[in-house]
Image (cartoon, helix red, strand yellow):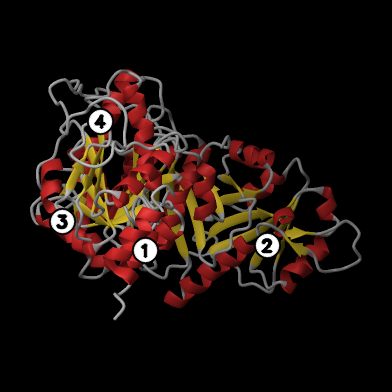
């Protein structure tokens, strides 16, 4: 999609560079005010993890949380190797900083709501045999992560267990497992590893989403793919007030906003420890407007919306520095990886199919 | 009065090496009162017995002179079933079950027949029976009410019971539990990682990752290799158990 230069709209507040006034609300500047974020207190005791129904459960594959050797030699040798190296912790993988950020949010939520069970809960999923799994447990201890729940399935599919834990988001490097999860209605994405991971905040969780086929359905992408830009623009203009369908990660954004509201209720709006971003190729006026109107119709209010009109997403992501970025198109995922963002491919929608000749 | 009838169709196992599993006949056959019909319906323990049999077959495949085998004994203690003794025996034949002995006793002295037969694990659907046997030092477990479907024998250990404080002396029942686990562990070691006819699964409900990790290490040090491990840390057990599909659950206490 290519129009003029990309527009950056701040979703909340009347400060818009161009286009109609689509929002109302307090004026927020484009960057977070980090000076007033409350100091992190170290936890001296291990509180119990919340019940699955109340928590926002994130299922993480051990392969993306840590850098683990791939099984090459055959299962028995692999287990022997893991047992021999049991005392050597694995180094952090691409999901590590995301999990640390989830824990930072939990710490702050517990300070404000000591009795609440509405927290992030990370469940570790691994195909690994339990004896290889012991090295994982020691690694978790070493890195001081707060993960109490895990499933070492010994090769069985994790999907049933994800459902049993009411998982809100599943991250794995295995495309088959991710597709299976998506089929079962669980928000999921294939996490990839940048060559060099850009440093991210350890006090504010930042989650960036693409729009079509991620937060929204792929209906507009289909139009664009088969009928090209002009038709797409006409279509969006015609349907500007018709909300788009749900995408696979809409539920996860909803869950994030549920937690955000808890901070707002305690007066932490400007320096909220969770910040959400929309980074989309859509541009002004109608495609952008339709996206925002769709979000509002769902009762959702993303913190920052970047409408790029087809421009590459790298520069914006470099500024935002999210802990995690979701996109359905490998072109954008690769662009994000290049600048050091931990990008996750959501294998959904029309963009997964080869282009028509 | 306790009586034992040997099943002549089945080769008797070596007494000091076999793993004796006793099951109540009520759980294996569902014989109606006065059916007239000789064939009984199968009960919840039926798939379990088939799975135990498959383990034996595979053990003998690996080593034809293997003596560490499951030795299944059927316990009949209620008076109704006592009258059906010939039906129980004929149904065992009919369904091709490898049951080596039939024990008949009254309700009061069924624990005596367990002890006489050197039972390592007693399985029943009756909570009180399990408690009684446990008190007499026989390791007991409740049968999974929902019929498990897998061919593979799946045993779930509730790991919260594995770690106990070393300050208390072990009860007779705990000793019995430990030796049963050790036997299962040895059996499991006869097979490789994949394609095993039995699968040992660790589940810890309370406690965090360390509890589960410590349980794994403790079991490993006793020669018991787990195939799967789950740390629930307070999450509800039943959705996970229905995925694990155990034939039976091994727990120390019978409250769960």
Q: Looking at the image, which residue is at 31% across and 50% down?
A: A286
| For residue B100, above or below residue A34 | below
Kindly report which numbered mark, 3 or 4, lies closer to the viewer in this rendering: 4
- Where does the image place residue B114, in percent across and percent down from the top left? 64, 49
Instruction: Mark 2 vs mark 3: give the one in front.
Output: 3
Q: Quadrant of the C terminus of chain A?
A: bottom left
B148 over A117 or under it: above or below:
below
The residue identified by callout 3 is A311
Q: Distance between the residues labelled 3 and 1?
A: 21 Å
Please state the chain letter of the residue tagged with numbered disc 2 in the rendered image.
B
User: Any mark on residue A349, and which?
Assistant: 1
Of badges 3 and 1, nearer the viewer stands 3
Q: Which of marks 3 and 1 is nearer the N terminus?
A: 3
> Foreground residue, B66 or A324?
A324
Which chain's residue wears label 4?
A: A
Callout 3 crowding tier (Cα within 10 Å): few <14, some 14–19, many ≥20: many
> What is the x, y in percent for residue B142?
61, 46
Whether residue B225 is visible: no
**Callout 4 crowding tier (Cα within 10 Å): few <14, some 14–19, many ≥20:** some
Residue at the spot of label 4:
A14
Which of the pair A64/B3 is nearer the observer?
A64
Secondary structure category for the residue under label 4:
loop
Q: Which of A106 and A323 is in front in this view?
A: A323
Q: Distance between the residues labelled 2 and 4?
A: 85 Å
Mark-to-mark CA distance, 3 and 4? 24 Å
- The picture quadrant where one finds residue B34 is bottom right
- Residue designated by label 2: B101
Question: Where, by quadrant of the figure, is residue A195 drawn?
Answer: bottom left
């Amino acid at each position: 999609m290519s129009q003029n230069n990309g527009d950056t709209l701040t979703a909340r507040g009347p400060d818009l560079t161009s286009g109609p006034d689509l929002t109302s609300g307090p004026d927020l500047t484009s960057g977070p005010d980090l000076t007033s974020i409350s100091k992190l207190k170290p936890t001296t005791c291990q509180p119990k993890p919340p019940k699955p129904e109340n928590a926002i459960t994130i299922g993480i594959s051990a392969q993306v949380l840590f850098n683990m050797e791939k099984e090459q030699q055959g299962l028995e040798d692999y287990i022997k190797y893991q047992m021999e190296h049991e005392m050597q912790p694995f180094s952090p993988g691409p999901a590590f900083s995301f999990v640390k950020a989830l824990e930072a949010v939990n710490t702050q939520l517990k300070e404000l709501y000591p009795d609440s069970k509405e927290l992030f809960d990370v469940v570790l999923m691994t195909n690994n045999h339990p004896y290889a799994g012991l090295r994982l447990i020691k690694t978790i201890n070493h890195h001081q992560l707060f993960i109490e729940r895990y499933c070492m399935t010994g090769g069985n599919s994790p999907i049933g267990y994800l459902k049993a834990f009411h998982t809100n988001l599943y991250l794995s490097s295995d495309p088959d497992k991710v597709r299976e999860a998506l089929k079962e209605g669980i928000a999921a994405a294939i996490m990839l590893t940048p060559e060099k991971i850009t440093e991210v905040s350890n006090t504010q969780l930042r989650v960036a989403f693409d729009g079509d086929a991620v937060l929204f359905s792929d209906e507009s992408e289909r139009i664009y793919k088969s009928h090209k830009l002009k038709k797409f623009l006409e279509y969006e203009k015609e349907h500007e007030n018709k909300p788009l369908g749900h995408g696979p990660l809409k539920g996860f954004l909803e869950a994030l906003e549920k937690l955000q509201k808890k901070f707002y209720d305690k007066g932490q709006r400007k320096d909220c420890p969770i910040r959400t971003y929309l980074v989309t190729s859509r541009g002004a006026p109608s495609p952008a407007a339709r996206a925002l109107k769709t979000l509002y119709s769902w009762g959702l209010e993303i913190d920052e919306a970047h409408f790029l009109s087809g421009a590459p997403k790298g520069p914006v992501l470099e500024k935002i520095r999210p802990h995690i970025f979701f996109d359905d198109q490998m072109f954008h995922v690769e662009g994000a990886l290049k600048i050091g963002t931990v990008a996750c491919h959501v294998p959904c929608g029309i963009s997964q199919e080869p282009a028509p000749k | 009065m306790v009586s034992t009838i040997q099943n002549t169709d089945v080769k008797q196992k070596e007494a000091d090496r076999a793993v004796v599993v006793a099951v109540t006949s009520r759980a294996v056959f569902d014989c109606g009162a006065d059916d007239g019909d000789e064939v009984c319906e199968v009960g919840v323990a039926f798939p379990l017995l088939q799975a135990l049999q498959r383990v034996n077959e595979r053990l003998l495949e690996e080593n034809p002179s293997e003596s560490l085998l499951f030795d299944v004994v059927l316990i009949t203690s209620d008076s109704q079933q006592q009258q059906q003794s010939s039906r129980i025996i004929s149904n065992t034949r009919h369904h091709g079950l490898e049951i080596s002995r039939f024990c008949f006793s009254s309700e009061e002295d069924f624990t005596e027949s367990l002890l006489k037969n050197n039972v390592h694990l007693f399985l029943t659907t009756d909570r009180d029976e399990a408690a009684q046997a446990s008190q007499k030092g026989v390791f007991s477990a409740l049968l999974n009410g929902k019929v498990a479907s897998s061919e593979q024998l799946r045993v779930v250990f509730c790991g919260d019971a594995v770690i106990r404080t070393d300050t208390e002396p072990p009860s007779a029942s705990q000793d019995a539990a430990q030796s049963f686990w050790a036997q299962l562990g040895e059996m499991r070691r006869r097979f490789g990682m994949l394609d095993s006819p039995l699968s040992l699964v660790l589940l810890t409900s309370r406690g965090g990752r360390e509890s589960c990790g410590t349980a794994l290490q403790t079991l490993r040090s006793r020669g018991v290799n787990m195939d799967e491990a789950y740390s629930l840390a307070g999450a509800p057990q039943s959705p996970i158990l229905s995925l694990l599909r155990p034939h039976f659950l091994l727990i120390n206490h019978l409250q769960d």
